[in-house]
Each structure stands twice: as C-alpha cells, then as structure tokens.
Image: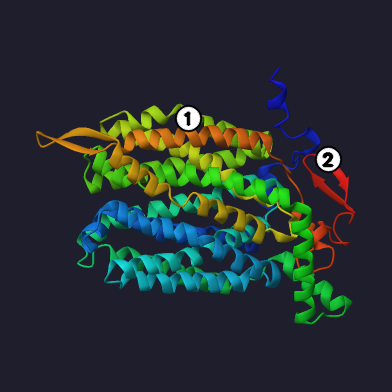
Amino acid sequence: MAPKFIQSLVPRREKRNSGGIIPALKSLTFLQLLQFFTGWLAWTCDAFDFFCVSLSVNTLAEQFDKQPKEITTAITLTLLFRSIGAVVFGILSDRFGRKWPLVANLLFCCSIEIGTSFVQTYNQFLAIRALFGVAMGGIWGLAASTALENLPVELRGLGSGIVQQGYACGYLFASMINLTIVPHSSHSWRTLFWTAACLSSTTALLRAITPESAIFLRAKALEKANGTSDTGEKTKIFIKETKAMLKTHWKLCIYAVLLMTGFNFLSHGSQDLYPTYLETSKGFSSHSATIATMIGNSGAITGGAIAGWASQYIGRRLTIVIAILVVGAFIPLWILPTSFSGLAAGAFCVQFGVQGAWGVVPIQLAEMSPPAFRATFPGVAYQLGNMISAASAQIEAIGGNNIRTTIVENGVKKNVPDYATVQGILIGVVAAYLICITILGPENHASHFEEAKTAFEKGAGQDEMQENGRPQSIRELGGKEVEVV
C-alpha cells in the first residue's frame, strides 16, 4: 500500500478518463490537429528566439566587448518584461478570441527578431531584448490555450506534454542552426535571429488561415441567437467578471505564481547558462557544447511527452513529483563527469526530469485556472514566476565568479568559474521547493473547462458553465462536485 499522502495525489477512479487515448486519437479531426499544431509551433518559435542569446553568450560578449555576465543581463530583461505581454495579450485573447491576438503577437515577435539582428551597440541590444520580453510573454498562454482547449479531455495530458516541449524543440532547432549554419555565415550570430523572424512570420500566417477555437465560435453563435451585444457592453461584462474572478480566486492566483516561480528557476537554472557552463567550466568547444545541448533537449522532449501522457492516469501532481525526483537523482551526473559522454548523459537525464515536470504544467494550470480565463490566468502566473526567477542566469554567472575551479587546457592550468557547483546547488534547492509546493497545491484533474462560459459572458467570473453544456451550477474541482453560487 502506498503512503496516504501519495494516494491523495492520484485522481479518484471515477475522475480518470475511460475512453482511452487510442480511440481519442482516432476521433481527432484535421482542424483539431491544425489548431494544436499552431499552438505548439508558436511556442517553438518563441523558444527558438529566446535561446538564440543563450547559445551566443560568448560570441555576443566579444561583439560588444563585454563580460558574459553582462550579456546575461539581456536574458534577465527578457524574463522581467514577459509579465507585461502576458497581461496584455492574455486579456485580448480571453476577450476577443485566440486567433487574432496570437497572430498579432507573432508578428510583434518577428519585428523584434529583425530588430535584434541589426543592433550595433550593447545598449541597443539590451533595449530590444527587453521589448522581446513583452512579445514573448504573450505567446505561452495563447499557444497553450489554443492547443489544449480544442482537444478531447482524454488527450489533454499527452497534448500538454507535447505542446510544452515546443520550448525544448525551439532550443533544439536553434542549436542545430547554431551548429550547422552560423559557423559558415559571415553574419555570425545575426543569422540566428533572421531564421527566428522567418519562423515567426510563417507561424503567424498559418494561424491567420486557421479557424478560431470552437469555444469562441460557440459563444458568438449564442450571442447571435440571443441578440448580439455591442462591443462596449461585452467589454463592461468582461471587466466585471474579471473583478469577480480575482475576488473569488485571489489565493489561487498567489499559489500559481509561487508554483511557477519554482518551475522557472528549475528551467532557466538548468538551461540558460548550460552552453557557457560546458565551454567555461569543462573546457569544451562551442561545437561540443552545442551537441550536448541538443542531446539534453532530446531528453527534454522525451520526458515531456511521457510525463504528460502519464499524468492522465496517475494525476498531474504525482507526475510532477516523480519527474522532479528524477532531476534530483541525476544532479551528480550533470556536474561531476569531465568527459563529453558523461556530461551529455547527465544533460539528457536531468532535462528528461525538468521538462517531464514542465510537460504537465500547461494542463495543470489550465485545469486549475478559473475556466473562463484560461489564457490570462496561466499566462500571467507563468510570466510573474518568470519575472521573479529572471535573475537565474545572472545568479549563476555571479556565483561562478565567486566559486572557482581549475581545469587544464592544452597542458596549462586555468582558473575558471565553477558553474557546475553553482548549478548543482541551485537545481537541488529548487527541486526540493517544487516537490513541497506541488504536493500542497490543488488539482482539478480532467475538468471540462471547454464547457465554461467565455470571459465576456455574465457569470464567467463565478465559473459558470454553458447552459447547453454541462449543468450550469456544477463545477468539478479536485475530484468533487461543488455548487457554484
């Protein structure tokens, strides 16, 4: 028999999905697949651009005659400004629909990526990366809601794992371009951002020709049947329902931010400075560091898909806890080896756990969220957590300047920052924190949030369901049925 607290993390049998994954996969329509793909691709494009900086820290330091820790300031600024984008684009999405706010957001990203490729000074670089933070902040909430709300309930765990690994895929694609094209380009690191601009603009075009999410089409149809409200009235309803939601769920808002703070420290602490760690503390070439990064992201993609699928059966929180335990178990393999094979294996295993836990995040946040605010609530919680953890790369860079080690390069001893020890300590502490806060948090496993009212309908702030969906007064919460007043 499992301990009682572990049993409490597993969803009740009647809450698990009985239809099965295979029948649900067979039931998918082309439109559902296309909407899911556009959500995944949007997040992939966003991650591609973000990691262009991580992969080019030493090159950018030479370009602007700065230290690596000064280049990481750009990463910090991007993370700090993401909350602004999450609020702006999240509200637009919950108010007007998923389609056009995401198209606008992607085109904004494209313009910033082009701008980044033409900067000439360090200050220009910092300014444009801060602006990219605003653009990047809006993507995740819109992409996740677009991808997941159109899937059958039985596939949302697996879908969550796959869509979140757009982040790892973006990192992997950027690593491939950095490895194969950048070394042969006379424009060096700027080539990465031109590629990112092409990806973002293509994704914007694809989203523009893909129909709106079914939940918003349904809401518009109901409006037409009941007499269409004007835009001003709907906006007033949206503001009123948003206030009602915050009044009801303010504790949940705080919890979600604390949860995402831990997740973002785990992710950025293990990824943003990883290529620099291998080059500086282990003496690897940029080529070898990029290959190791690609191996790590292969582990991330694998872990995210497996954990997302498993969460459908053993619950969201238990899956997260197991994945984080995997991270803790492989920290020694992440930092102790000196060979490429050992460190690459450590990267694969640790990222399997890190992104395995992350693979559950989109669906855990979507199910936890007030159902009418599935773009704003998860997106803002995610990006506020990002803002708090924004200094991850700088913490590691400063820690490396104070904790030193000695390596031998070409027969000569060299004193270098000990990023291995710094990252090991940070990841270990964050992993312990995440296990605790995950166990203590709520879980609304397999909720039918797609049947909730949209944010511009009366009653949305009280989590009311559509009258033509499930009973209006019933909301599933953590395996229980409760009356909504």
Q: Which mark is residue 328?
A: 1
Where residue 206 appears, as percent x and y from the top left, is: 53, 70
- Say few, some or many: other residues with alpha carbon within 10 Å of mark 2 (under 14 / 14 to 19 / 20 or more): few
In this rendering, position of residue 339 left or right of residue 159: left
Q: Secondary structure at mark 1?
A: helix
Outermost residue to the front: 402
> What residue is shown at x 63% (from left), y 55% (from top)?
378
For this view, does 226 lie left or right of residue 354? right
Please name the amino acid that badge 2 sits on.
Lys
Q: Which residue is mark 2?
A: 480
User: In the rendered structure, which amino acid carries the disc numbered 1?
Assistant: Gly
Marks 2/1: CA distance?
Answer: 33 Å
Q: Position of residue 130 (x, y in %)?
A: 43, 65
List x then y, in percent, for residue 370: 74, 55
Q: Mark 2 or mark 1: name the one nearer the start of the chain.
A: 1
Which quadrant of the figure has residue 280? top left
Using the rendered view, name the quadrant where residue 277 is placed.
Answer: top left
Q: Quadrant of the C terminus?
A: bottom right
